[in-house]
Image (tube, rainbow, N blue to C red):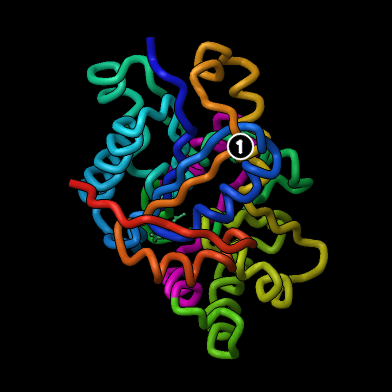
Amino acid sequence: MMQKAPIGVFDSGYGGLTVLKEITARLPQYDYIYLGDNGRAPYGNRSFETIYQYTWQCVQWFFAQGSPLVILACNTASAKALRSIQQNNLPKYYPDRRVLGVIRPTTEVIGNFSKTKKIGILATNGTVQSDSYPIEIRKFFPEANVYQQACPMWVPLVENNEYKNEGADYFIQKNIQQILQQDDEIDTLLLACTHYPLLMDKIKQFLPKDITVLAQGEIAATSLADYLRRHPEIESLISKEGKRKFFTTDSAEDFDAHAKVFYGSNIKSEKVEIL
Ligand code: DGL
C-alpha cells in the first residue's frame, strides 16, 4: 500500500506558481510540492524531444518523493510531453500514478466564455507549434475558430523583471495586434502560458474592453477539485496537512527572490539535482 504524499506541481520555472497559488486557495487542505526546472528553463523554444525528456525526468522525481498525482502547470510541457507520459510511460512504469496537464481542463470550458466562438490563444512557440489548443478546443466546441499567436519575448520580460517597464509595451502591443488582426470577431483571449498572468494589466491596456482575457489558474484549480471528487482512489493517497514545499533545479536564493511576484507570498525553496 502506498504512503500518503503531496500533490506534485511542475513548471519549467517560476510561472507555475501562478497556478499553484490558485490551486492552494481552492484546495488548501492538501499537501503540495512544487518543482521549477529553472536550471533548464525556458522550455518554450526547445524541441519536442528535449521538452519530453526534461518533463519525464521531473515527473519521475515527483514519483520518487511519493506523489501519487502530478500536475503539469506548464503549457509547453503539457503540449509536448503529457500525451507520451500518459499513454506510454505511466501504464508501463507507474500504473498507479497520475499526471494531468492544464490544456485539457482549459479547452473543456473555454468556448463557454466566447459569444462569437472566435478564440485567440497567446502562448510560447512550443505550445503554438504543437497545435494542442486548436485540436483540443475543436473536440469540445466544434463550431469554434481558434487563432494562435506565439509571444516569445513575454517570458523573458517576466523572468528578467522587465514586464512593468515601457520596453515591455512594445512586445505586448505587437503580439496583441498580431492576434487581433487574424479575425476582428475574436472576443476571448487565453493566456496559455504560466507567466502571462503577470502581464494581465498591460495586456488589458492594449485591448478593446469587450474582449475577455482568461488566465488558467482558476480553471486548473476547479478542474483539479472536480478530478479529486471523481477519483477517490487517488484522493485517498494524498496527504492532508496543508503543507507546501518548493524545489528548484537552479539557485534556491534566486528562486526565493523571484517567487513572490508569482506566488504572492514569500517562500523558501531547496535546490535539487534532476538526472
Ligand atoms: N511555463 C511555460 C508555459 O506555461 C513558459 C515558460 C517557458 O518557456 O519555460 O508554457
Say left or right for 232 vs 65.
right
In this view of the protein, which residue sits in the foreground, 42 or 263? 263
User: Horizontal and vertical percent for residue 266?
Assistant: 58, 63
Query: Residue 43, relative to residue 173: is it above or below?
Result: above
Point 41% across, 59% down: residue = 13
Task: Using the image, determine if residue 12 lies above or below residue 133.
Answer: below
Quadrant in the picture for residue 24: top right
Residue at the limit of the structure toward the right, as seen here: 210
Work out which quarter of the rendered image holds the N terminus and state it: top left
- Please tell me whether mark 1 sits on a helix, a strand or a loop: loop
Q: Is residue 161 above or below residue 210?
A: below
Q: Is residue 42 left or right of residue 215?
A: left
Q: Amino acid at mark 1?
A: Gly
Residue 35 drawn in magenta: no
**Magenta run includes residue 139:** yes
Q: Position of residue 270 (x, y in %)?
A: 37, 55
Residue at the left extreme of this rendering: 275
Ligand 1 is found in the corner quadrant, namely bottom left
Give, as a single range, the part of the protein colored magenta: 131-159
Which quarter of the figure has residue 248?
bottom left
Residue found at x 76% / y 61%: 211
Q: Is mark 1 within 8 Å of ligand 1?
A: no
Residue 120, above or below 61: below
Along the line of sight, which residue is nearer the eye, 41 or 27? 27
Residue corresponding to mark 1: 242
